[in-house]
Image (cartoon, coloured by chain):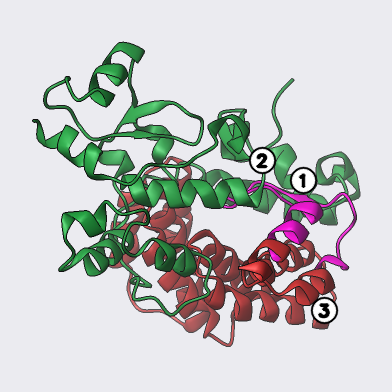
Chain colours: A green, B red
C-alpha cells in the first residue's frame, strides 16, 4: 500500500456538505453561512490543507480521484476535497501555515494511529477555538512565514488614497459613492474584492 | 534629486517590493515623523510580499508613536482581523473609533464599527455585536478585505448567535 493511500485511509471521514457550503463568485469562493465556513475550517484541519489557500491546489480528474479513493492509484501527492466538493492535490501553495503545523504537532505527539483516526482528530476543537479567539491556544501568534504574495496590497493602498481624496472633493462624488466601502468596492478589481465588472 | 521616499513609493507601484525593502534599509536616520512614514512603506512592501505577520508587527510598532494617525490604528485592526488575531484587533479598532470621533473624521468609522462587530461576533458577544451594528446602515456590506468573509448585518448577527451557542 502506498504511503498516500495509507494516510488517506487513516484520516477521519471529512463531513462537509459541499452542495450547500457556498459557491464561486467572481473568482472567489463565498461561504453561504458562518456554519459552512466553520465546517470547512474543521475539514481543512482534518485534511491538513490550508483553509485559506485550498483553491490553489491542482485539480484532480475524476478517473484519478476514483483510483486514489479506491487505494489503487500508487504514489500520489496528498489529495483533499475543497468546500466546493472538488478534489485537488496539495502543493506548495496549499501547505498549512506554521502556526497550524505546530498546533497539530503538539496535539499529535504521543498519539496512536487509532487515536488520530478517531471520530475527532486530536487538536481539532482547540484549533477552531484558537481561530475564533476563544482559547489561549499555543498557536504561535507571530510566525513570520512567507505567505502567498498579496498582489492586492498595492491596489488597496492606491484605492484607499483615491477614496480619501474622493471623499473630500465635490467633483469626485461619483467615485466616493457615499461611503468608503462603496468607494473601495468601486475602485478595486473584482479579484481584490471589488465589484464585479458587467 | 528625487525624494528617497518617492523613489520607494515608485518601486512599490511598480510591484517591486523586495527592492523597496532594500532601499528602506539603506536610508540614513531621520526624525520621528519621517521614520513613521518609512515604516508605513515597509508595511506595504511586506504585505506585497505576503509577509503578513511581519507587516502586522511593524503596524503595531507604528501605533505606539505619538504621531500615529487614525489610519494607523484602523490598519492595525484590519490586519489583526485578517490574521484572525481578534483579541489584538479589538483595541486598535476601538482606538481608531475614538480618534475618528474626537477628530470628527468619519472616513474609517464604518469599517471600524463593522470589523469590531465581527470581533464581538467571533467571541459570541451578541449585545456588543448589536451595539456596533447600530452605527451602520441596514444595507451595510464590507467585502473587500482579504481573508475576511463578506460582512453584512445578517451575517454578523447570525455568526454572533452561533458562537454564543458554542
Locate residue B54, reporting x and y percent: 37, 66
Disc 2 is placed on an element classified as: loop
Task: Identify residue for label 3.
Answer: B101
Residue B49 in view of the camera: no
Q: Nearer the viewer, residue A182 or A133?
A: A133
Disc 3 is placed on an element classified as: helix
Residue A104 in view of the camera: yes
Task: Identify residue for label 1.
Answer: A183
Q: Is residue B6 left or right of residue A77?
A: right
Disc 1 is placed on an element classified as: helix
Q: Are marks 3 and 1 on the same chain?
A: no
Residue A76 quadrant: top left
* Image point (82%, 46%), residue name: A176
Task: Identify residue for label 2.
Answer: A32
Locate residue A96, reporting x and y percent: 31, 51
From the image, state whether disc 2 or disc 3 is nearer to you: 2
Report the quarter where the C terminus of chain A lies.
top right
Q: Are marks 2 and 1 in contact (CB under 8 Å)?
A: no
Residue most extreme to the top: A63
Q: Chain of mark 3?
A: B
Locate residue A181, reporting x and y percent: 76, 50
The magenta stretch is B133-160
Q: Is residue B155 left or right of residue A153?
A: right
Locate residue A44, reporting x and y percent: 40, 47
Q: How many other residues sit within 10 Å of disc 1, few (<14), some (14-19) or many (≥20)?
A: many
Mark before the other along the chain sequence, 2 or 1: 2
* Image point (12%, 27%), residue name: A75
Report the quarter where the N terminus of chain A lies.
top left
B138 within the magenta span: yes
Q: How many other residues sit within 10 Å of disc 2, few (<14), some (14-19) or many (≥20)?
A: some
| Label 2, label 3: how far apart the Cα atoms are | 34 Å
Q: Chain of mark 1?
A: A
Amino acid at each position: 500500500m502506498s504511503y498516500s493511500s495509507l494516510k488517506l485511509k487513516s484520516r477521519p471521514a471529512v463531513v462537509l456538505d459541499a452542495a450547500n457550503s457556498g459557491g464561486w463568485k467572481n473568482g472567489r469562493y463565498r461561504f453561504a453561512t458562518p456554519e459552512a465556513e466553520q465546517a470547512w475550517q474543521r475539514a481543512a484541519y482534518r485534511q491538513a490543507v490550508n483553509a485559506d489557500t485550498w483553491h490553489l491546489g491542482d485539480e484532480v480528474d475524476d478517473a484519478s480521484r476514483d483510483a486514489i479513493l479506491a487505494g489503487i492509484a500508487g504514489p500520489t501527492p496528498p489529495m483533499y476535497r475543497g468546500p466546493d466538493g472538488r478534489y485537488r492535490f496539495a502543493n506548495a501553495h496549499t501547505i498549512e501555515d506554521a502556526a497550524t503545523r505546530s498546533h497539530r504537532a503538539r496535539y499529535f505527539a504521543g498519539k496512536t494511529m487509532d487515536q488520530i483516526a478517531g471520530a475527532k482528530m486530536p487538536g481539532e476543537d482547540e484549533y477552531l477555538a484558537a481561530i475564533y479567539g476563544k482559547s489561549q491556544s499555543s498557536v504561535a501568534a507571530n510566525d513570520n512565514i512567507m505567505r502567498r504574495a498579496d498582489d492586492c496590497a498595492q491596489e488597496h493602498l492606491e484605492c484607499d488614497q483615491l477614496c480619501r481624496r474622493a471623499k473630500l472633493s465635490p467633483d469626485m462624488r461619483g467615485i466616493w459613492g457615499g461611503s468608503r466601502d462603496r468607494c473601495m468596492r468601486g475602485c478595486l478589481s473584482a479579484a481584490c474584492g471589488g465589484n464585479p465588472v458587467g | 534629486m528625487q525624494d528617497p521616499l518617492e523613489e520607494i513609493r515608485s518601486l512599490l507601484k511598480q510591484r517591486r517590493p523586495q527592492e523597496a525593502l532594500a532601499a528602506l534599509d539603506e536610508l540614513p536616520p531621520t526624525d520621528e515623523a519621517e521614520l513613521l512614514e518609512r515604516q508605513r512603506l515597509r508595511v506595504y512592501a511586506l504585505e506585497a510580499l505576503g509577509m503578513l505577520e511581519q507587516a502586522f508587527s511593524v503596524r503595531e510598532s507604528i501605533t505606539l508613536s505619538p504621531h500615529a494617525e487614525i489610519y494607523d490604528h484602523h490598519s492595525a485592526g484590519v490586519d489583526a482581523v485578517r490574521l484572525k488575531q481578534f483579541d489584538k484587533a479589538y483595541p486598535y479598532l476601538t482606538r481608531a473609533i475614538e480618534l475618528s470621533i474626537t477628530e470628527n473624521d468619519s472616513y474609517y468609522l464604518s469599517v471600524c464599527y463593522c470589523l469590531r462587530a465581527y470581533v464581538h461576533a467571533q467571541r459570541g458577544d451578541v449585545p456588543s455585536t448589536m451595539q456596533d451594528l447600530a452605527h451602520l446602515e441596514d444595507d451595510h456590506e464590507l467585502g473587500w478585505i482579504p481573508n475576511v468573509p463578506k460582512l453584512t448585518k445578517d451575517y454578523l448577527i447570525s455568526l454572533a448567535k452561533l458562537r454564543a451557542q458554542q
